[in-house]
Amino acid sequence: MTVHAETEGLAYRHLFQQLLARHNAMGLATVPVSELAAAAKAKAPVRDVRLGEIPGRSGRVVVVA
């Protein structure tokens, strides 16, 4: 699940804290994307990327070239 600090993180902080507490009680780990990226970096394939549009998504995002 992705949570954006500037939107969900501020408006729903209390609910997010409850969710994290429930996950912790279930033994689930909450980790930042930076940890996942560091762990996968050595195995990740190299790809050319560019900015592009995806149907149904507003604005431009990074897409595989």
Image (tube, helix red, strand yellow):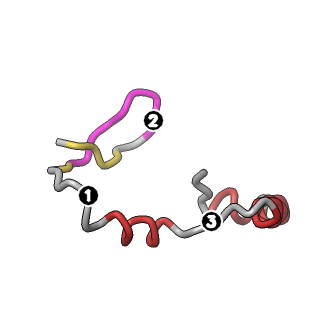
For residue 46, which quarter of the picture?
A: bottom left
Specify the amino acid type for callout 2. Arg
Residue drawn at (84%, 62%), measured in percent from left and top? 18
Viewer-proximal residue, 48 or 50?
48
Q: Residue at x 15, y 50 (%)?
A: 48
Q: Position of residue 43 (x, y in %)?
A: 26, 61
Residue drawn at x 40%, y 42% is 59
In the displayed structure image, the side of residue 20 where residue 14 appears, left or right = right
Q: CA distance from mark 1 to mark 2?
A: 25 Å
Q: Give the residue type that dot 3 points to.
A: Ala
Dot 1: element: loop
Q: Which residue is mark 3?
A: 5
Please name the residue shown 65% across and 66% down the image: 29
Asked whether 57 or 28 is in front, the reply is 28
- Binning the other alpha carbons within 10 Å of mark 2 as few (below 14), some (14 to 19) or many (20 upward) gives few
Percent x, y of residue 39: 38, 69
Q: Do labels 3 and 1 touch, CB within 8 Å? A: no
Q: Quadrant of the C terminus?
A: top left
Please name the residue that numbered disc 1 is placed on.
Answer: 44
Residue underneath mark 2: 57
Q: Nearer the viewer, residue 25 or 60?
A: 25
Marks 2,3: beta carbons within 8 A: no
| Distance in Å between CA atoms under marks 3 and 1 | 27 Å
- The answer to if 35 sits in the magenta stretch is no
Picture layout, residue 56 above or below residue 23: above
Query: Counting other residues with Cα less than 10 Å from the Cα at mark 3, is it few (<14), some (14-19), or many (20 or more)?
Result: few
Start-end of magenta stretch: 50-58
Task: Specify the label residue 22 is tagged with.
Answer: none
**Residue 2 on image: x %, y %:** 58, 54
Instruction: Establish if 20 lies above or below 53.
Output: below
